[in-house]
Amino acid sequence: QQPVQSPQAVILREGEDAVINCSSSKALYSVHWYRQKHGEAPVFLMILLKGGEQKGHEKISASFNEKKQQSSLYLTASQLSYSGTYFCGTGPYSGTYKYIFGTGTRLKVLA
Amino acid sequence: KAGVTQTPRYLIKTRGQQVTLSCSPISGHRSVSWYQQTPGQGLQFLFEYFSETQRNKGNFPGRFSGRQFSNSRSEMNVSTLELGDSALYLCASSLLGRDRVNTGELFFGEGSRLTVL
């Protein structure tokens, strides 16, 4: 079952903040966040591991609530380069080697 | 360090034909996974390979198959193409090892865009 992301789309002005949420119906062991610009490959932003460890981007932060099976990506002081579609990815689940990606959030930053 | 390379980048096929897509992972990455991306369904997991073994498969019909070679390069094949198979097929490599420990991110190739007429 695909994690559900919210909002589906958001438009910001440069300098504004945004939060993208990712909610799973299954237990999460790790959460990845990726950004995909139009016509390009998804690019890794952040990984959050069970237990609180985070690795990733300097200017983007994220949280991981294991009990609620949710993760949120925080984009502060948005720049034009932040535009794209953001995906959360969960996995690999225990016993599998699957990565399941969320429904995606389209973000557009305007000058 | 060279990234993930996918070939061909674009291809057009007709219904009923078959297609083979190729993926060369980053050197040292032994895990290769494949995804189908469509506007309506987002990124859907197809399968994952490690050391020439398929370790998991997504919910796709048997027309979708893959393999991995000893040098970690991977191919996926779609037989008896249908219009609904039109999509961007992405390959990703990672350092995901034998023990399922998530050792890092997925590195994606630019994809192979398949159009079925």
Image (tube, helix red, strand yellow):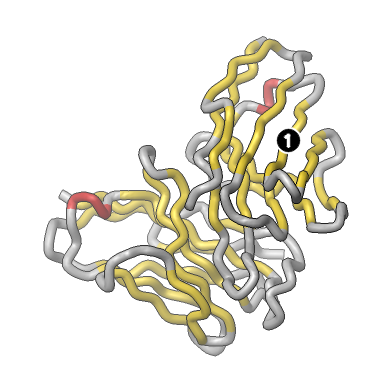
Most extreme residue toward the bottom, as rendered? B70
Q: Which residue is rendered at x = 62% and y = 45% of the image?
A: A88
Q: Picture coordinates of residue B99 (x, y %)?
A: 71, 80
Above or below, comparing residue A15 to residue B23 in the picture: above
**Front one among B12 and A65:** A65
Above or below, comparing residue B74 to residue A54 in the picture: below
Where does the C terminus of chain A fall, quadrant-wise?
top right
Amino acid type, residue under disc 1 in the picture: Leu
Q: Which residue is rendered at x = 58% and y = 86% of the image?
A: B51
Q: Picture coordinates of residue A53 (x, y %)?
A: 87, 54
Badge 1: residue crowd in 10 Å (few <14, some 14–19, many ≥20): many
| Left or right: residue A76 compared with residue A82 | right
| Left or right: residue B41 compared with residue A11 | left
Most extreme residue toward the front, as rendered? A67
**Front one among A72 and B6:** A72
Above or below, comparing residue B2 to residue B113 in the picture: below
Instruction: Say what secondary structure mark 1 lies in.
Output: strand
The residue at which mark 1 appears reads as: A73
Residue at mark 1: chain = A
Q: Which residue is rendered at x = 58% and y = 20% of the image?
A: A10
Residue B16 occupies which quadrant of the picture?
A: bottom left
**Front one among B64 and B26:** B64
Q: Give the total number of marks visible in the rendering.
A: 1
Q: Is residue A85 visible?
A: no
Q: Which residue is rendered at x = 71% and y = 44% of the image?
A: A68
Q: Is residue A46 visible?
A: yes
Residue B100 occupies which quadrant of the picture?
A: bottom right
Q: Picture coordinates of residue B53 (x, y %)?
A: 51, 86
| Left or right: residue B70 compared with residue B28 | left
